Image (cartoon, rainbow, N blue to C red):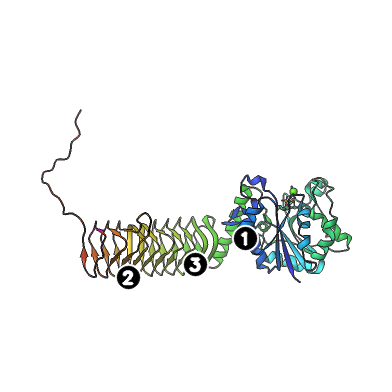
Amino acid sequence: MSTTVIILAAGKGTRMRSSLPKVLQPLAGRPLLGHVIDTAKHINAEKIITIYGHGGPLVQQAFAHAQIDWVEQAEQLGTGHAVQMTLPVLPQDGISLILSGDVPCIRAATLEKLLAAAQSTGIALVTLTLADATGYGRIVRKNGDIQAIVEHKDASDEQRQIQEINTGIYAVSNAKLHKWLPRLSNDNAQGEYYLTDIVAMALADGMQVASVEPEQAFEVDGVNDRVQLAALERQFQAAQAKALMQQGVHLIDPSRFDLRGNLKVGQDVCIDINVIIEGDCEIGDGVEIGAGCVIKNTKIAAGTKVQPYSIFDNALVGENTQIGPFARLRPGAQLAAEVHIGNFVEVKNTIVGFGSKANHFTYLGDAEVGAGSNIGAGTITCNYDGANKFKTIIGDNAFIGSNSSLVAPVQIGNGATVGAGSTITRDVAENSLAVERSKQFAKENYQRPQKLKK
Ligand code: UD1
Ligand code: CA
């Protein structure tokens, strides 16, 4: 049977106190709604309908390429009213999964269970038992069978003792939604059209209401304010960290690790504390990442050792390289195997060949460095004239003396040597020495200016 996913995302999220619509607030670097849409795609939904209201254009822009349908709920008159808005585009048959844009961690496996339950009954809910159920809709059962959902504000004292709550996630027959939704009324404590009233309608139709529980409680946690957002972030991160450890990653402290994206890992990868990994990254066998590194959209091949506080952004790092501490690899940095990039070295749009080293205080931008070359401390490729970028090409086995400026466009041949402190503006031939500096001036018995004694 075909599945439609309906995502409620019209709420304002006043308690976030933010100019950003709530469903665009980030969890693990991605908008809340993005998590829900990705999960919906995982379960092969035929159609994903998102109900928007507050911040509509911003929300739509953020998901312009997501291939989802949008339905507007101009006024937020309740969850039932929200789903009513989908009726003109809701298929007549099949089942709809109803999700919330601010409940980002629901797992596909839980939704599959929910769908399976709804296949036989026509309606199923995700419920959870909480120690403190204050505020939630309560699941009223009789002899174990679900009789109703009663909102906290409408509940009697006795019903408020119920600890089983409605998580706001449902699977319902589309035919029934077409039948029931037009009949909802707002005759209740909040004057809202409650989606939860469909439970009573199902019973009136002689149906049974099925329920399933999530494997982990945080799957159904909603985000209403920044305190809840931060708490959910930690739970989400803990779950990701656990999955990585189960794949064999040695996380020195899983509570001080953040993955905001996707990470593919080899065996025996060791990650020290306070590392942040963003976007799509790959880390090969035996790689060690020191404390405080930030790694974004980067591949690091096997055997590489990264010392603390190194930053990677769209870089490609070969096998058995040594990076950092305090190295910065910017977009287009490509390091071959066994390269060394040391402290305070910045590499941008530059290819560094096998075994070459730039160990201290260097800028390599728009450059190519061959194999086996040594770039001395303080070397700068002067790649920019204020308007244009130019290339510096350094051959194999070259030696660039400390504190040299290489003014691009310029080429340093294979085996060439540049003397320390040179400003190189013309090409340097293979195996030659180039030195550009004035002769050392000397004066004997030189007396420095003295401070006057008072
Ligand atoms: C709802 C349920 C309650 C459940 C709780 C779980 C109803 C009547 N009650 O409560 O049983 O325990 O969720 O969190 O459904 N939204 C719209 N348009 C609206 C109203 C809400 O899009 O007009 C969206 C919100 O943005 C949110 C979701 O629906 O994503 C749930 O709304 P919220 O107000 O948080 O739910 P409650 O009414 O508190
Ligand atoms: Ca409400």
Residue 359 placement, left or right of 229 = left
Q: State which quarter of the image contains the N terminus.
A: bottom right
Report helix, strand or loop for mark 2. Answer: loop
Residue 444, position in %: x, y?
10, 46
Query: Helix, strand or loop at disc 1?
Result: loop
Q: On screen, 177 above or below 431? A: above
| Amino acid type, mark 1 | Ala
**Mark 2 neighbour density, 10 Å: few (under 14) some (14–19) many (20 or more):** many
Quadrant housing residue 353: bottom left
Amino acid at the residue labelled 3: Glu
State the image coordinates of residue 93 (x, y, percent, origin top left): 80, 68
Q: Tell me the element at label 3.
A: strand
Q: Mark 2 points at which residue?
A: 371
Q: Give the side of residue 229 with respect to residue 200, left or right.
A: left
The reply to whether dot 2 and dot 3 touch (C-beta < 8 Å) is no
Q: Which of marks 2 and 3 is in front?
A: 2
- The residue carrying pointer 3 sits among few (fewer than 14), some (14 to 19) or many (20 or more) residues within 10 Å by Cα, namely some
- Give the residue at mark 1: 64
